[in-house]
Image: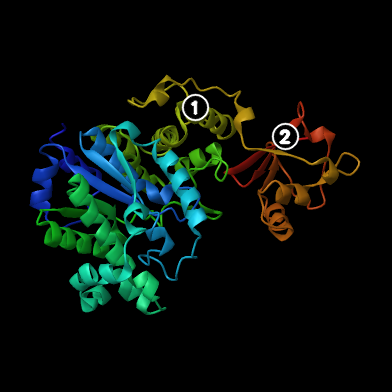
Amino acid sequence: MNSTVYNELKERGFVYQETDAAALEKLLNGGQVTFYVGFDPTGSSLHVGHLLPIMAMRRLQQAGHQPIVLVGGATALVGDPSGKSEARPILSREEVAANAAVLKAQLARFVNVDQAIFVNNADWFKDLLYIDFLRDIGSKFSVNRMLAAESVKQRMETGISFLEFNYMILQAYDFYVLNAKFGCQVQFGGQDQWGNIVCGVELARRLNQKDVFGMTFPLLLNSQGTKFGKTAGGAVWLDASRTSVFDYYQFWRNCDDADVGRLLCFFTGLPIDEIHRLAALPAPAVNRAKEILAFEATTLAHGYEAAVKAYLAAGSKFGFADPESKIPTSSRLAEVKADSEALDDLPTFSIPAAELTDGKIWIVKLLTASGLCTSSGDARRLIQGGGAYLGERRIDDVNYQVSDRDFDHGALLLKAGKKKVKRIVR
């Protein structure tokens, strides 16, 4: 049992709010504690925005504590209003069930599933009688207090349905059930879950007469103040069919210098003193810290071999920050020899034969078909702005026809700016 895990969570920046800091410190630094983190299966994949509570759960499990992973098969049918400006789309039961299965499989990459308890709140909500629930549970909640919750107040401006208004009670009931059935003592969640967590703590204490606690993690913003985990193309997914392993690696590799230390604390297991040393590297050496971050984060999400391939592919195209591994690190990246022959692992687009005319394809059409640009207008502006490249050659003619001479052994590299690249084959 790690007797300093609470202090480590603090030092790494995980702790934002607590119902009782002194009691939580004593509890988590003592014997084994059963805790839970909940995930509503509202999508067919987790994304980077989900990772902060997952990494905290991983660290707590490694310290000897018992995680309960709650999949919200029932609450996903209602929709959490927290942090949302409008209601979520209402999903069918079949969609929620399918999403729940995928979510469990993805979480298994981060936690030891043999030493975790997986539950689905649909199991205890499906047979509840509405009148009984209102009388036994609804009577314990003050509407005035619920209206004062930040998650509800924000939505009052745009409108909140009675369905969503019930979400707080349902999540609170989850904690009551988990405390009664498994002895769960702590709920962890994101900053926007504070009101829901406090309600759950109070309900479990009142009905079970047990001491239970809650803790939230900070809302993760980048140095520009925008929500972490988003790109111009949308969310960064853990599903490799939605965000390729290469693009996942590049997302982390392209973080701002000012963010790398904080991200290493959250999303890697590197020692704190090593993280401080890496984050303090001056430019351009700090790029090695970004490579380590990207490698470690990709290893967790997709495995070591996939992370090695992504690192080599990115380095082959954009250069390696520390090709001779002179900067000390405990990361396994230090074992990987920088190799410039990994271009086959770049995201690849195969030109359909129907798109070729006399063996040629218009550069604008290729940029859009490959997904590097969203429209012909976008592709034209990229070319006119000097951001389109075939290999290392800039293309500044919007009428350019890509032909056999541009291919080397049946492939070419097409770039949109400095960070977006596709391997093109025919």
Q: Is residue 214 above or below residue 273?
A: below
**Horizontal side of residue 184 vs 312, given as left or right:** left
Q: Is residue 160 above or below residue 259?
A: below
Amino acid at pointer 1: Val
Amino acid at pointer 2: Leu
Q: What residue do we see at 56% from left, 46% from top?
A: 242
**Horizontal side of residue 362 vs 20, given as left or right:** right
Asked whether residue 41 appears in the rendered view, the answer is: yes
The residue identified by callout 2 is 412
Give the quadrant of residue 17: bottom left
- Whole-percent x and y of residue 342? 60, 26
Q: What residue do we see at 77% from left, 40% from top?
A: 351
The residue identified by callout 1 is 308
Q: Nearer the viewer, residue 238 or 124?
A: 124
In 3D space, how far apart are the residues under numbered discs 1 and 2 (Cα atoms)? 22 Å
**Horizontal side of residue 292 vs 236, given as left or right:** left
Q: Nearer the viewer, mark 1 or mark 2?
A: 1
- Whole-percent x and y of residue 52? 34, 47
Quadrant (top left, top right, bottom left, bottom right) of the C terminus: top right
Give the quadrant of residue 115: top left
Give the quadrant of residue 257: top left
**How busy is the neighbourhood of tag 1: few (under 14 within 10 Å), some, or many (20 plus)?**
many
Q: How many marks?
A: 2
Which of the marked residues, 1 or 2, is nearer the chain's N terminus?
1
Question: Callout 1: helix, strand or loop?
Answer: helix
Asked whether residue 112 appears in the rendered view, the answer is: no
